[in-house]
Each structure stands twice: as C-alpha cells, then as structure tokens.
Amino acid sequence: MADPVINPTQTSASSATQTQFNDPKVAKFNIPDVVKEKYSDLIPLIIETESMNDQEKSYWFQILPIMTTEQVDRLRNILITEKQQLSKLDEEYKQEMSHINQKNADSWKKFNAPEAKEKIQAIKQAEAENKSEENDKEAQLLDQLNNI
C-alpha cells in the first residue's frame, strides 16, 4: 500500500487529509490538530524517518507547535535530505545487487554448460569405476583371508 502524499501547501485539514491521519502509521501518534493543519507536510516525513524511534517521533509532533519557523524549516530540510540520501543509497544497493546477481548468473551458466556437465559425468563415472575396483579387491582379500 502506498504511503499517503500530503501537499505541503495545504493549510487546513481536508477530508482527504483526515483519512490520511487515520492511517495506522499516523494513528498511533497523538498528533495535535495544529500540527495536522499547519505542518501536514512534515507528518509523513517524521513518520517515515528511519533515524527516530516512535518516542522521538511523538516528541517532535508535540514540540512542533512551539518551534520557530526557522527551526521547523531546519527540521524539514534535515528530514528531506535524509529521505533523499536513503533513496540514493537504496538505488546504489539495488544496482550493486543487480550486478552481483548478473555475475553469479554468468557463473551458474558456466557451471551448467554442457562441457561442465560432461566433466561432472566423467568424474562420477570414474569414481564409480574406482569404487567397483575397490569392492572387487576387498572381496578378493576377504576370500584369501577366509582360505587361510
């Protein structure tokens, strides 16, 4: 399910915003109405941040109404920058995993190539022949011991 997108220019709690505030992620926090009305763009940023636990998030929701405009702007910039940096890292991680998976796929293809299968079959056959020879020698030795 996609996270709700709140328009940063929104100045009052519309019915769509009210629905978003009923989202379980949002509902577990006691967000003051003034925050919902005045800082609705910050709510998803605070909720989605990975750098805060729930107690810290609750603290920020409670402290927002008494923060200065400059402090709110700094908080907003920090949260946006964090989100952008994490998105960038996620993309780099996905690219690296794709590269690793491709490299492993190439190795797997080489392992499953007909030549590799033939070599494996030849090794298994040689092992089976050696095992058979060993069993024959073992049986001969046991016969000799029994005949003594």
Image: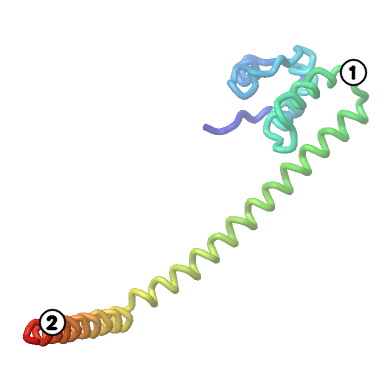
Residue that extends furthest to the front in the rendered view of this protein: 148
Q: Which numbered dot is residue 142?
A: 2
Q: In the picture provided, is 16 more to the left or to the right than 71?
A: left
Question: Residue 76: percent from the left, percent from the top?
Answer: 81, 34
- Name the image quarter holding residue 45: top right
Identify residue for label 1.
66
Q: Amino acid at mark 2?
A: Leu
Secondary structure, mark 2, is helix
Question: Residue 86: percent from the left, percent from the top?
Answer: 70, 47
- Name the image quarter holding residue 40: top right
Question: Residue 83: percent from the left, percent from the top?
Answer: 72, 42
Q: Which numbered dot is residue 121?
A: none
Secondary structure, mark 1, is helix
The residue that appears at 91% across and 26% down in the rendered structure is 69
Residue 52 position (above or below residue 39): below
Q: Amino acid at mark 1?
A: Ile
- Name the image quarter holding residue 15: top right
Q: How many marks?
A: 2
